[in-house]
Structures are given as C-alpha cells and as structure tokens.
C-alpha cells in the first residue's frame, strides 16, 4: 500500500538527516529568543524586589498578568503575552483566532497597505509581522533544504542541505506569498460566509446551545479545508523541486492537480502523519501535567521536555516532506512505467 510504504520511507529518511533536524531546531530556538529574551528581561525588572516573585513561581495569576500587560502597554513584546500560554488553554482560547484567520487577515491587511497604498502601518502588529516574515523566510529555506535532499536517491551531506535551501529559497518564498493570498481569500469568502450564516440563523435563539453546535461544525469544516490547503502547498513545494518548476502559480496548480487526482493516497498519508502529531500533543500534555512547577529543577526539567517536544514536531515536519516526496516520486514513476510499457501481444 502506497500510504504505509511512503510513511515508512519518510521516517527512514529522517533518520539519515538527524543533523539537519537538529539544525532546524537550533534555528527555531534562535528565533524564539528574539521574543523570549526581551520579555524575560522586562519581566525580571517588573518582579524583582516585589512580593509576587515567589507566588508567580508557584502559580500564574491571571489578574497579575493583566496588570503586568497594562503597565507595559508600550512594549510590543508584552502585548503579545497571553496568560493562556500556560497549561492547555491555548488549544481553546486561540482556536477561535485560527478559525477566523485573525493572523492571516492581519498580514494581508499590512501587505495591502504597504503595496497598494504605500503606507507602512506601524502598530501593535508591526513587530509580529516582521517576526512572521522572518519565520516565513527561515521556513522557506529549511523546506527547500529538506525536500531537496529527500528528492535524491543518495544520502546527502549537511553542505548539500544548505545549498539546496539557498537554491530553492526564492521559489519557496514566492510560493509562500501565493499561500498567503489563497488563505486570505479562503477566510474572507468562505469562513466569513459561514459566520454570517450562523449569526443570521441563530440570532433569535434564547439558548447558546444551537450556536455552539453550529460553530463546532464550522470548526470541523474549516480544519478540513485548512488541511487540504496545507497538503496542496506541500505537493506544490515537492513539484517545484522534483520537476524543477520556476512558476509558483504553476507549481501550486500542479500540486493541487496531483493531490486530488491521487486523493486517497495523498490525503491518507497526510492524515496518518497528522495522527502522529496529535499523539505527540497528548504525550506532551500528559508528561507536562506530571511535572511539578514550584521550584527550579522541575521547571528546568519541564523546559527540557518542551524542547524535546519542539524537536519531535520538527522531526515530524521533516517526515511530512520526506513521505510526500517519496509518494510523489513513486506514483509518477509508476505512471511513467505504465505509459511506456508495450501493449500485450495479440492472440
């Protein structure tokens, strides 16, 4: 079965690229430090010499975090701090932002003002935008490196990984801009339409039960389409590398065509890898709940566990690239062999 075969090949290939995955983890840590270090410095100055330092170590207080953000309102770093980053609240609190595409809309509006109105809208989201742009650039470089080495039939060196990352950076960055436009249109036309329908249908309801059920159905629909878009752009990247394509729009069209013409295999592999991702989340949540967070060494252990989780997520992302690349190569090779094979002899 192509799904299982590609899944196994993907993880086999990732074992050969451990240095590259650790390099990707190191780069992500450096990006996180851009926000973490200034935030920690401001937090240390705010807490030092107060009676709250020991209390905050034992338990995060939502009221205190709100007061901290209000006092540091001029800092873009602190404005991005949400007390729900602790424990499991992000899976609930930030889900609505993802379902409505808040982040994508913000970036789209920023770029629209910059390109069409010649306005540089500096505000609370400006730092977030530039950090996101840096992340997109880094992700384009790493994706090019990983797909480049997984597309080859021989083990590659770390130098080849860096060279492939640089070689495909421009192509993948242009494809990222196409992805931003597609996601923006998706949220504006489809998601906004669903939200308007739910609001108009349930605005006279006395109970919140019916709107809640409708929004849960909306979340399932949105997540399904987001998974389709993510898969389509993954195969667009694969086709850019394997087929040596230069047009980002052409690669997106070709990736979409391949994904849907082989939907059972492509989406089956995507779901299987996504299931592994959910298992990683559950494993991390259980492990995190077992570690006390009231003293230095348990907190240090929790930090190690968190970094191990990030590393495993990057390993899984590499497995996405590897498995999807091998699936594409396998299907294309099989189709080519079938097209050139001689017809059976006539009797």
Image: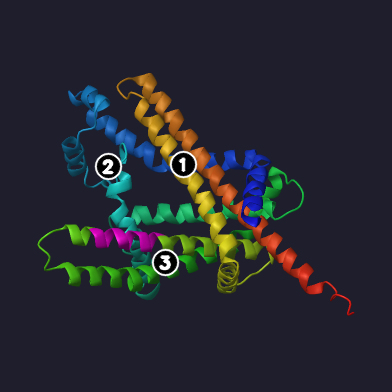
- Left or right side of 198 for 112: right
Determine whether label 1 and label 2 are within 8 Å by CB: no
Whether residue 1 is visible to the viewer of this picture, yes or no, is: yes
Residue 193 in the image: x percent, y percent? Answer: 29, 73
Q: Depth check: 251 or 228 in front?
A: 228
Specify whether residue 219 is painted magenta. yes
Residue 305 in the image: x percent, y percent? Answer: 45, 30
Whether residue 76 is visible to the viewer of this picture, yes or no, is: no
Residue that mark 3 sits on: 183
Provide the residue span drawn in magenta: 213-223
Residue that mark 2 sits on: 84
Query: How many angstroms separate mark 3 from mark 1 (CA)?
Result: 27 Å
Residue that mark 1 sits on: 279
Q: Depth check: 247 or 289 in front?
A: 289
Query: How many angstroms separate mark 1 from mark 2 (CA)?
Result: 22 Å
Task: Please name the residue shown 70% across and 60% down the image.
Answer: 330
Residue 13 in the image: x percent, y percent? Answer: 67, 45
Task: Please name the residue shown 42% across and 54% down the image.
Answer: 132
- Left or right side of 135 for 10: right
| Sooner in the amino-acid sequence: mark 1 or mark 2 | 2
């Amino acid at each position: 079965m192509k799904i299982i075969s590609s899944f196994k090949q993907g993880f086999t290939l990732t074992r050969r690229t451990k240095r590259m995955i650790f390099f990707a983890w190191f780069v992500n840590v450096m990006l996180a430090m851009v926000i973490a270090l200034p935030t920690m410095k401001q937090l240390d100055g705010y807490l030092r010499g107060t009676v709250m330092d020991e209390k905050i170590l034992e338990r995060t207080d939502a009221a205190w975090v709100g007061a901290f953000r209000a006092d540091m309102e001029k800092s873009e770093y602190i404005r991005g701090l949400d007390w729900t980053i602790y424990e499991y609240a992000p899976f609930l609190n930030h889900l609505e932002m993802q379902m409505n595409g808040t982040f994508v809309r913000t970036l789209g509006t920023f770029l629209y003002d910059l390109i069409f109105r010649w306005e540089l809208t500096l505000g609370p989201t400006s730092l977030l935008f530039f950090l996101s742009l840096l992340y997109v650039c880094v992700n384009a470089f790493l994706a090019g490196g990983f797909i480049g080495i997984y597309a080859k039939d021989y083990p590659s060196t770390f130098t080849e990984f860096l060279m492939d990352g640089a070689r495909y950076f421009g192509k993948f960055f242009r494809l990222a801009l196409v992805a931003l436009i597609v996601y923006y249109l998706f949220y504006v036309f489809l998601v906004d339409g669903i939200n308007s329908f739910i609001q108009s249908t349930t605005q006279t309801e006395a109970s919140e039960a019916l709107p809640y059920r409708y929004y849960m159905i909306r979340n399932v629909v949105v997540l399904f389409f987001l998974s389709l878009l993510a898969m389509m752009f993954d195969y667009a990247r694969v086709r850019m590398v394997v087929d040596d394509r230069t047009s980002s729009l052409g690669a997106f069209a070709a990736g979409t065509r391949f994904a849907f013409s082989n939907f059972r295999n492509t989406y089956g592999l995507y779901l299987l890898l996504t299931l592994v991702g959910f298992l990683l989340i559950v494993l991390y949540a259980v492990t995190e709940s077992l570690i006390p967070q009231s003293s230095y060494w348990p907190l240090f252990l929790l930090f190690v566990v968190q970094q191990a989780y990030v590393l495993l997520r990057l390993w899984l992302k590499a497995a996405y690239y590897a498995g999807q690349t091998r699936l594409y190569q396998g299907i294309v090779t099989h189709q080519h062999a079938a097209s050139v094979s001689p017809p059976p002899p006539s009797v």
